[in-house]
Amino acid sequence: MSKTSTKARRKKTRANAFDQLAEITSNLWWTWQPQLAPLFQSLNPRSYESSNQNPVVALRKCTAAKRRTLESNPQFVKGVRDAHRDLSRYKRAKTLYAKGAKASSNVAYFCMEYALHESLPLYAGGLGVLAGDHLKSASDLGLPFAAVGIYWKRGYGRQRINAAGKQVSGEQLIKPENTPFSEVRTSGGRPWRLRLAMGSDRVTVRAWRADVGRVPLYLLDTDMPANKPRDRKLTHTLYSGDRDTRIRQEILLGIGGWQLLRALKIPVGACHLNEGHAAFLSLERIAERMKESGETFAQALRYVRNTSVFTTHTPVPAGNEEFDPALVDHYLSTYQRKLKLTHEQFHNLARVKPDNAKENFGMTPLALRTSRYANGVAKLHGEIARKMWSGIFPKKKTSAVPIGHVTNGIHLQTWLHPAMNELLSEHLGENWAENQDKSATWKRATRIPNEALWNLHAQFKAELIEFCRQRIERQLRRDPVRGMKLSDVKNILDPNALTIGFARRFATYKRATLIFSDPARLAKILNNKKAPVQLIFAGKAHPADTEGQAFVAEVVRFSRMPRFRNRVVFLEDYDMNVARHMVAGVDVWLNNPKRPHEASGTSGMKPALHGGLNLSILDGWWPEGFNGKNGWKIGTGQDHRGTAKDDQRDVASLYKTLEKEVVPLYFKRANGNTPTEWIARMKNAIQSIPHVFNSHRQVKEYWKRYYLPALRNHARQA
């Protein structure tokens, strides 16, 4: 073979490697393929880390010299080729639902936020995490699915803890070139544009497409020169602005999102409204049906109801979105005319009690009235939701109110530590992930040797502690704290201590500070030399939530007290990256909300995947998950009535459970240094929780109970 042909072949191989890598990074499939991280990191380690593990940035900032080096590295080229092959096979594979889902129409999923990866902060908390995991499982299962959201250019906000111990909120610009998003174009190749009516104004909208495995996610964007400054800001920051901004954001999501799907000619047979933010979608669909089919309002409403699924996530009345009727009239009066309704009839769609002029325009009542299929996100939450909204169905008994429940789950491959994946593959079988929602799969966890599980957990804890020390050191270098030296960072946290984690949104009902109710008693628990305990906290409060921010400051204040220093840590800027470290490394996951304010919660499902044990109020998913041997309960399942006595009751149970059960069991080492009885609980958690609380089971439930009937209704009424 000539030198010329050899060079040509090498050049082709080089081009293919980076072309293939570009294709891999353009599909968010990589977010649940942790084995690819070393490949991405090799492109530009500094850029990869500083961008929060963003392979798109690492690839873009890979220098020409580095490319040449990597192109000549057979191991790198093989890694890229193997990953590209795996992605191609994934997209082509005949999945479990490929045949049954061969519908001519898709399920369209609408949500205000999506948590797909820490480098894309388009999420605030549990709702976004749930939505991101839902899309990933829909992709894995091969459902006919398309999703709609908003491209929040400045994300949800960064969190910094300053020298005074207070939260400082900042912004993070998410540039398109640093994302795997591609701008949506028309069939003629021109950028797609929509002139969306918002009252008397017209707002120009464009859209971006993100591929989440097999599922397309369309993100709406108004940040363009063609718009007024106030309209450009609509898609800047998630959950920001006044009520005027919020209603326009929800018009964008529901009405603009539907118009996008129609413009792209994506066939839709069912719509899933994940929370009430997208409920204006139903008004647009009814109006369109009346115009195109000549149906009456009642006929069009029947069709839309029969093809709509609504999931409520908020068991607190004040947490459900409402708008002043005058504000709704200002922006949506045209829909009153399109639907051929009187003013009262139009507003009655969004009232609990018809003709009650004192009621605001409620997005949850609107969604419930226009969706045949409705659900809460845990069994207990379903019961609460039926009671909360029974007024909308006055002729039905509370037990017969048409709101069911589909308990949330997590996308296992997104949250699973790679080393734990190897251990599970070894003992559950290589194909365990394909059968993750079968109890028989997880019963094999008894085969895992105690020492192997314990040693791996010790590794995860060591990784978590090192991660915490690095984050604390970075914080101190930026904002020095009096009395704290950089040299002391190495003493923060103890790998031999019982480690308890608390990480979530700092909403006040979650009571992040509850464990500090009796500082002296807590200090005694933490500083026991024979049985040391430590606490790791993380979480953001909304920039407008002063009470939540006060909770953050309180936890930080305790962490800096001499009697709690090194035993209590607060990690700033909580995100999916912080969460992954914590759920793998903690021994115990603490959850103490005011029951029944936690709709579901998914954070506690993640430590269980690694053998972590929950210590939780019987709220959200835990009443379904707790079996007496896979963790502990706080209290006896009593509701919080909003009194100080309720807090005192719960904290007394928390302390007693820690002192009498959790801590003694962890340090009970009958056989050398291995806590046999503790490990038995770890295995029980692995056996009893992941097979139920995974998003594959969750999405299958939605498909069978809601999506498939809605698609059939569409086929009958199309």
Image (cartoon, rainbow, N blue to C red):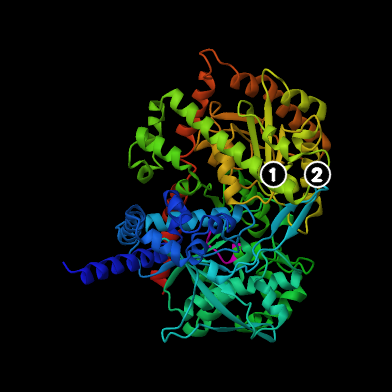
Q: Position of residue 184 (x, y in %)?
A: 48, 77
* Disc ID at residue 222: none
Question: In the rendered image, is residue 286 in sight?
Answer: no
Number of residues whose C-alpha sits closer than 10 Å to that of mark 1, classed few (under 14), some (14–19) or many (20 or more) = some
Quarter of the rendering containing residue 543 = bottom right
Q: Position of residue 50 (x, y in %)?
A: 59, 57
Q: Is residue 497 above or below residue 292?
A: above
What residue is shown with label 1?
Answer: 473
Quadrant placement of the N terminus:
bottom left
What residue is shown with label 2?
Answer: 481
Q: Which residues are magenta?
A: 368-373
- Direction top: furthest residue: 670
Q: Given the image, on which type of amino acid does mark 2 rest?
A: Val
Quarter of the rendering containing residue 156 = bottom right
The answer to whether marks 1 and 2 mark residues whose Cβ atoms lie closer than 8 Å is no
Helix, strand or loop for disc 1: helix
Front-lying residue, 485 or 49: 485
Front-lying residue, 26 or 486: 486
